[in-house]
Image: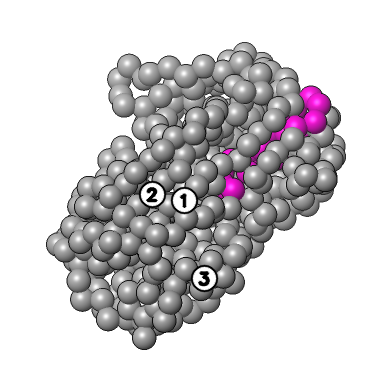
Amino acid sequence: MAAVLRSNLRFFVPGDKSVSHRALLFGAMAEGTTRITGLLAAEDVGRTRTAIQQLGGEVWVDRSGGVNVKGGPWRDGGTIDCGNSGTTARLLLGALAGRAGATLIGDASLSRRPMRRVLDPLARMGARIGGAGDERDAARVTLPVSVDRAALRGIEWRAEVASAQVKSAILLAGLAAEGETAYLEPVATRDHTERMLRGMGASIRVEPVEDGEGRRIVVSASQLQAAEITVPGDISSAAFWFVAAAIHPGARVTIEGVGVNPTRTGVLDVLRRMGAGVIVVERGGIEPIADVTVVGAELRGTAIGGAEIPTLIDELPALAVAAAFAQGETVVQDAAELRVKESDRIAAVVAGLRAIGVDADARPDGFVVRGGGAVGGHVITEGDHRIAMAFSIAGLRVPVVVSETESIRTSYPGFLERLAQLSTG
């Protein structure tokens, strides 16, 4: 028997994972002591914290719960285990290139994820890189990767794939490079790095691209300065509760203090199109923060693609569950990046939907969901935290057994406990 979502719920979600990683790393690169409130206490962020400590950064928690990071010159870090955190690995590659040496390793999942998109531009900048690559496939560069400190030079790099992680790595390397470094992205991706660098005194500007829809971000050599950083609630974590409300007509869930950076709010736009009520009460801030309410309704299918994909790439597993309980067809395209996440999320989403009785098909760059038909079943998560959480939410409507839930702790400790508190049955 499926559980049922309680109505009129109001609560917080843990701190934003993307902002948490950057706050720690940038604090370690800055002059002085940076104080962070709202830092996410999850395994992935813990990997970044441990990494900067290996590189000489000091991190401590004060009496009021704030996390303090004292920056300074970096030392060689030896072997740094990034675990399952792609953000830790990719951002560190850029930050290390002009500052210190280290060898980055990861777990089995991270060691399959592509790193060439970061290492190619870094090599062009003069980075000293070793140990990268898969001898069986020269085009596929993966961890482990070694980086030694080198004198870098600025370049202009036009990205073929929209990726905030790649962009951030190149911009961080540019802070230690001679001349300007320009990164051209085909469509706008999440801009947490640009906002935080600007707030910490970096020389950075953002320009439109004349021949396309993307942006040109330019940095030059800069010494970051310590700052007070507030981490908003993670909209990627909130998305599961937004979908939980949306698939229960009349249910109402409010997430307080959630980040509503416009490069991250695509999930709210899609839920509106599908017929859910969405109310945003803004609080302001360098990273925009708001109280967001979603009201459930009879949902309808929609098309998701194009420039909105980077604004919701991590929320697509949750939105697939919304599509499962909607009337009509939902088509997701332009999302080939899902193939190289913690799992092949296109395959994992479609397999999960079929397992609970939903008609769904995979496409090279997305998937199609024909709503209705969900009866429940056993879902294999492939060790992917977002697949596990998405189908746990589906279990609020139909009986679902999720193969494993240990992966959830990498991004949302306490998710299952919250789910138990918010459901009946």
Q: Which residue is mark 2?
A: 293
Which segment did they paint magenta? 15-34
Q: Coloring scheme of the render?
A: one colour
Residue contact between numbered discs 2 and 3, judged by CB atoms under 8 Å: no
What amino acid does circle 2 point to? Thr
The extreme left residue here reads 328
Quadrant housing the C terminus = bottom left
Rendered location of residue 339, percent (x, y): 40, 57
Residue 178 visible in the shown view? yes
Residue 361, by quadrant, is bottom left
**270 lies above or below 110:** above
Asked whether, in this view, residue 115 is left or right of residue 358, the answer is: right
Quadrant housing the N terminus = bottom left
Q: Secondary structure at mark 1?
A: strand
Q: Which residue is mark 3?
A: 421
Which mark, by number, is residue 255? 1
Q: Secondary structure at mark 2?
A: strand
What amino acid does circle 1 point to? Ile
Rendered location of residue 247, percent (x, y): 29, 64
What amino acid does circle 3 point to? Gln
